[in-house]
Amino acid sequence: MPAVRLERQGDIAEVILARPEKHNAVGRDTLTELIAIGNQLRKDRDLRAVILRGEGPSFCSGLDIPSFMTQPKHILRHFLRPFWRQTNNFQEVAWVWRELPVPVIAVLHGRCYGAGLQIALAADFRLATPECELSIMEAKWGLVPDMSGTVTLREVLPLDVAKKLAMTAEVFSAERGRELGLITETMADPLTAARELAAQLATRSPDSVASTKLLFQRAWPASVAKAFRLERWYQLRLLVGKNQRQAVKAVQGKGIVRFLPRSVQR
């Protein structure tokens, strides 16, 4: 049985962690399958949004460390970085969702620990049940968060708060996570809310949505001058594109709007 399942509803993809008996802990198969699916979706220009969720009682309880410890060679294989990437596989399993040129919505419930939280942080939005439990749990195993968390955590937390949570491996509710800025929204049924948000995003120009994601991710940590250059670059690409004219037609109510497949990749 696959550790990850991909389901398609029109132009929306749902990526489902499918090890419910293990609370979707990330094992070797999960690692490779998530990366492969992320790379597959990146090439799909008809894709409009991705929902990332877990089957069973939890979103993801973290890395399946016991399974890796039985064969240390697997840790080394995934820890070494391929020369063509800036990430190793442990980092890429989260970062692949950040690099996807469409919005990614993580739906969280049950446990969201360690690797699970770092994967969720690489999504654009995190919708969770209020009682969902969160933890930067690597310190429990004598480790540091090394699955892209040092980049994504700094985007949402002050340094002192991130240090405290990472050093203590504290378990806290999604409601507390929302107060801290880790969680976008909490609600009783985050999956329905995620599907509604994905459908809403799909009504916009795919080039505009992709450009907004890429622009914000690159401009947010940049200097003022670089941020302004990026604004001009992405806006110019949109202004000469066909999908922007379709967006104008939608605003003006002139005929049937048909957006073309996404042209923006990077």
Image (cartoon, rainbow, N blue to C red):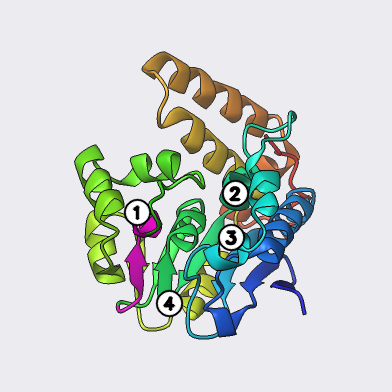
Q: Distance of mark 2 from mark 1, alpha carbons?
A: 17 Å
Q: CA distance from mark 4 to mark 2?
A: 22 Å
| Contact (Cβ within 8 Å) of mark 4 with mark 2 | no
Q: Earlier in the sequence, mark 2 or mark 3?
A: 3
Residue 229 magenta-highlighted = no
Which quadrant does the C terminus fall into?
Answer: top right
Amino acid type, callout 3: Met
Q: Position of residue 183 (x, y in %)?
A: 35, 61
Query: Mark 1 belongs to which amino acid?
Result: Ala
What is the quadrant of residue 244 in the picture? top right
Where is residue 181? Give x, y as percent: 29, 54
Asked if the residues shown at circle 4 and circle 1 are in contact, with their CB atoms under 8 angstroms apart, the answer is: no
* Residue at left offset 40%, top offset 57%: 141
Q: Mark 2 or mark 1, which has the lower sequence index? A: 2
Q: Which residues are magenta?
A: 131-140
Q: Mark 3: which secondary structure?
A: helix
Quickly name the residue at label 1. 139
- The residue that label 2 is drawn on is 90
Pick the quarter of the image with the N terminus. bottom right
Gap in Å between the C-alphas at discs 3 and 1? Answer: 17 Å
- Going from the N terminus, do you reach mark 4 or mark 2 first? 2
Per the image, the residue denoted by label 3 is: 69
What is the spatial separation of the Cα atoms under label 4 and label 1, in whole angstroms? 22 Å
Q: Does dot 4 land on a helix, a strand or a loop?
A: loop
Q: Position of residue 108 (x, y in %)?
A: 45, 72
Q: Position of residue 166 (x, y in %)?
A: 30, 50
Of the residues shown, which amino acid type is indicated by label 4?
His
Q: In the figure, is residue 203 to the left or right of 144?
A: right
Dot 3, crowdedness within 10 Å: few (<14), some or many (≥20)?
few
Q: Is residue 85 left or right of residue 193?
A: right
Q: Nearer the viewer, mark 4 or mark 1?
A: 1
Between disc 4 and disc 3, the foreground one is: 3
